[in-house]
Image (tube, rainbow, N blue to C red):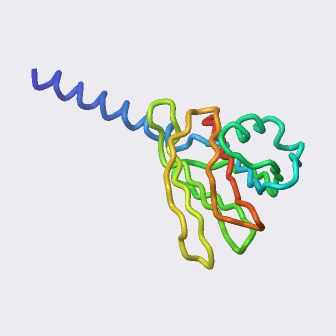
Amino acid sequence: MVRLFKILITITGIFCFLVQPAFGNSQVLTDVKVIHASTGSQHVDPGLNPIISELQSVFKYTAYRLLNDQQLNLRFNQKGRVTLPGERTLTVMPSDMDGKRIRYQIEIQKNNQPIFQTQVLLRNNSSITIGGPQFNNGVLLFNISGSVH
């Protein structure tokens, strides 16, 4: 009985050793779109056509301009940074998986001081848009998509 217990412990240890690094080495393709949303004009940047219906259903702005579209290939717990207007920086970090959802830690800094922090659970291969700070008679929006591969 003791021998069977030792064998089971050894097999469990080997399994944990083999499976854990596979998760740790996973890459999370993260796309961050920085959008300036405002009212007044009726302009929509053509680069936002794939997500414009989502934007217009959630936000009540009439103009959407794509300021930055940056793809980041990150490992879990690796920070990716996107430069924002107004001397701000957006940091996104996939921290782990919760079922089929990627947990992201999101932070905005201005002058190296955090001004906004949150976390979101994003279904794998999907996106979410969150509102950000005011900028140029409008606001900044961040469309974040993630895909684990």
Instruction: Pick the quarter of the image with the N terminus.
Output: top left
10 relative to 73, above or below: above
Splitting the image into 4 quarters, where does residue 128 fall?
A: top right
Q: Nearest the camera: 26 or 82?
A: 82
Q: Nearer the viewer, residue 29 or 22?
A: 29
Name the foreground residue: 144 vs 61: 61
- On the image, the x and y values in percent for residue 26 come to 57, 40
The residue at 53%/48% (across/down) is: 104
Q: Is residue 140 above or below residue 148?
A: below
**Image location of residue 70, percent across then percent down:** 76, 52
Viewer-closest of 138 and 97: 138
Rendered location of residue 126, percent (x, y): 64, 34
Q: Quadrant of residue 122?
A: top right
Q: Is residue 53 left or right of residue 76?
A: right
Q: Residue at x 58, y 48 (%)?
A: 75
Q: Quadrant of the C terminus?
A: top right
Q: Position of residue 46 (x, y in %)?
A: 89, 43
> Which residue sits at x=60%, y=36%?
148
Identify the residue at the far front of this view. Answer: 40
